[in-house]
């Protein structure tokens, strides 16, 4: 920790070196000879006493504690940064044994990550690990996959998972990196082989997250500063700042830009390396063509046609980013096209055409940018249909999203059912009323129905055969976060399926 100037003092109780055999920041998860981190806004000294009683012999903290008397102690300037560095060392720097790819952006991180994993699996025999907001995959066996709790895990958990992936024979790692991961030093000291910046729009701004947009953007940009090669969507807002951040540590020859064929880059000071153009789309798949526009892009053998089993022109942008990543990892067009062809993501653009109640779409869209993109696509693709939206906003976080929901619903929705979505310690009625207060009711009719199952039922039941029903926010999540408890919930996909079966009397299947 010397190079980072983190260590303030150390107190070693005896001259005999003691080997740390376990690391933890949870006083309930302690083994013999544990190194314990006193971290978190909710940390209390009694946790250190519990850890000591359970077998911890050394603690890391920003101040000495009487409760740690008799223990070794490392007093540091920032315990979250220290935990990242010490965890990496404890798990023997697993990042050195993996080709590490990281995605950041306000929207598209999960989809792009799954796309790239699907392609890399083609060339490494399925040995691509994944850390995402949906699932973490650390090996090829069923027990190596599990539901994630954070988009980017705490540093200790992240490096432990990376070590597990290496021990399981994984050779590549694709991960989502959230702004909170940098805000809370979960990836401090980690460098990526490839770093992607997909887009930026106001999000995650609130009392428990980022104080303002500038802080949110700053945290997002750190991914590029810590990447050996950078891939940037040239159409992102704040492009100049994004590109400048990449150039602070990366030679322009290792920075790649991509954009749609229609994007005018006259204002850009640097050329776009890759272009993509829509070919055709239908209810089941999306086709587009990728062009290599610059000399360095043409060195990658990835130009050509691609097909996605996911709706949405925005997924062409996500797909393009992932394909560039595959090319930089050594993959050619044919392997990439095969790998991305059938990728689906639980809770992302899962669609069902009903007989008499329109098209039902379950999607994780959970902020203004993703909601606008989804509804804009539906309006254009299906000839201006009546759009019915079921959506809620989470409590305790993302407070800045709520006006964005109001704006997007006013812009595109004909009817909105405002409902419950992980209210936490807030009142879901108050959250719904806050969103409702910003909606122009002359353009969008609103019903507040806090029972999410009933809201989904009523929305589908109300729909005519040419309508589009968008069930947004929770995707495949099988719980509601209510007052600190993960309360079981069947998931929007299951509920929608049950409603369709009830209304139409047949066993339909959602299409990914």
Image (cartoon, rainbow, N blue to C red):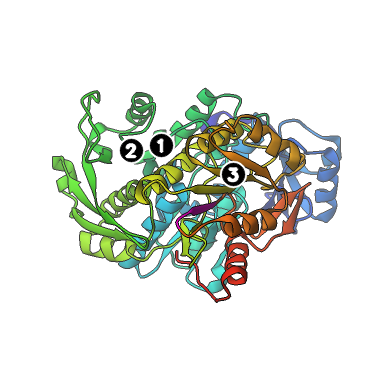
Horizontal and vertical percent position of residue 127: 41, 66
- Give how far across and how far down residue 8 sits, in percent: 66, 28
Q: Residues within 10 Å of mark 3 (few under 14, many from 20)?
A: many
Task: Look at discs 3 and 1 and give the one toward the viewer.
Answer: 3
In the rendered image, residue 375 lying in the magenta stretch gets the answer no
Q: Bin the neighbour count of mark 1 within 10 Å (Cα to Cα): few under 14, some 14-19, many 20 and up.
A: many
Q: Position of residue 183 (x, y in %)?
A: 57, 33
Q: Which residues are magenta?
A: 466-470
* Residue at image mark 1: 199
349 lies above or below 67: below
Give the alpha-carbon distance from disc 3 to disc 1, as whole Å.
27 Å
* Front: mark 2 or 3: 3
Q: What's the magenta bit mostly, secondary-structure-wise? A: strand
Depth check: give the residue in front, 17 or 377. Answer: 377
How many C-alpha atoms fall within 10 Å of the one at disc 2: few (<14), some, or many (≥20)? many
- Marked residue nearer the N-terminal end (1 or 2): 1
Q: Write down the quadrant of residue 507 in the picture.
A: bottom right
Label whose residue precedes the other's in the sequence (3 or 1) = 1
Circles 2 and 3: CB distance less than 8 Å? no
Between residue 220 and residue 508, name the one nearer to us: 508
Cβ atoms at labels 1 and 2 below 8 Å apart? yes
Do residues under tags 3 and 1 come within 8 Å of each other at their CB atoms? no
Marks 1 and 2 sit apart, C-alpha to C-alpha, by 7 Å
Which residue is labeled 2 in the image?
A: 233
Q: Quadrant of the C terminus?
A: bottom left
Question: Is residue 151 visible to the viewer in this orientation of the structure?
Answer: no
Asked which secondary structure carries label 3, the reply is strand
Residue picked out by circle 3: 416
Mark 1 lies on a secondary structure that is: loop
Which percent across, then down, holds residue 20?
A: 67, 53
């Amino acid at each position: 920790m010397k190079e980072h100037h983190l260590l303030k003092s150390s107190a070693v109780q005896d001259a005999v070196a003691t080997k740390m055999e376990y690391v933890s920041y949870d006083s309930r998860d302690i083994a013999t000879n544990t190194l314990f981190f006193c971290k978190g806004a909710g940390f209390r000294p009694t946790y250190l006493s519990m850890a000591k009683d359970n077998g911890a012999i050394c603690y890391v903290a920003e101040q000495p504690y009487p409760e740690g008397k008799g223990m070794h102690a490392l007093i540091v300037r920032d315990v979250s940064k220290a935990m990242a560095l010490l965890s990496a060392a404890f798990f023997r720097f697993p990042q050195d044994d993996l080709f590490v790819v990281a995605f950041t952006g306000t929207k598209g991180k999960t989809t792009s990550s799954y796309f790239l994993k699907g392609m890399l699996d083609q060339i490494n025999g399925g040995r691509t690990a994944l850390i995402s907001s949906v699932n973490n995959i650390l090996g090829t066996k069923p027990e190596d996959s599990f539901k994630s709790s954070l988009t980017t895990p705490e540093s200790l958990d992240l490096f432990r998972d990376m070590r597990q992936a290496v021990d399981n024979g994984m050779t590549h790692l694709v991960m989502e990196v959230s702004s909170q991961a940098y805000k809370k030093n979960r990836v401090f000291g980690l460098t990526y082989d490839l770093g992607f910046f997909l887009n930026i729009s106001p999000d995650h701004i609130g009392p428990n997250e980022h104080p303002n947009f500038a802080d949110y953007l700053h945290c997002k940009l750190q991914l590029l500063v810590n990447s050996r090669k950078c891939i940037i969507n040239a159409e992102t807002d704040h492009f100049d700042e994004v590109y400048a951040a990449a150039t602070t540590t990366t030679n322009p020859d290792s920075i790649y830009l991509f954009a749609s064929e229609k994007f005018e880059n006259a204002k850009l000071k640097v050329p776009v390396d890759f272009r993509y153009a829509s070919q055709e789309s239908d209810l089941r798949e999306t086709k587009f063509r990728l062009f290599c526009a610059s000399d360095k892009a043409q060195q990658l053998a990835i130009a050509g046609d691609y097909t996605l089993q996911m709706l949405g022109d925005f997924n062409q942008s996500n797909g393009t980013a992932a394909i560039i990543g595959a090319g930089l990892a050594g993959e050619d067009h044919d392997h990439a096209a095969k790998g991305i062809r059938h990728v689906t993501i639980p809770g992302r653009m899962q669609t069902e055409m009903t007989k008499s109640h329109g098209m039902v779409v379950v999607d994780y869209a959970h902020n203004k940018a993703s909601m606008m993109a989804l509804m804009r696509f539906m309006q254009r693709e299906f000839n201006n249909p009546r759009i019915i939206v079921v959506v809620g906003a989470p409590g305790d976080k993302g407070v800045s999203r709520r006006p964005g929901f109001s704006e997007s619903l006013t812009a595109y929705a004909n009817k909105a059912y405002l409902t419950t979505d992980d209210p936490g310690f807030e009142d879901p009625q108050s959250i719904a009323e806050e969103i409702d207060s910003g909606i122009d009711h002359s353009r969008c009719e609103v019903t507040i129905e806090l029972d999410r199952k009933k809201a989904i039922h009523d929305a589908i039941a109300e729909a005519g055969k040419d309508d589009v029903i968008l069930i947004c926010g929770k995707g495949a999540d099988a719980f509601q976060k209510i007052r600190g408890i993960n309360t079981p919930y069947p998931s929007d996909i299951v509920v929608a399926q049950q409603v369709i079966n009830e209304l139409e009397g047949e066993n339909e299947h959602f299409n990914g």
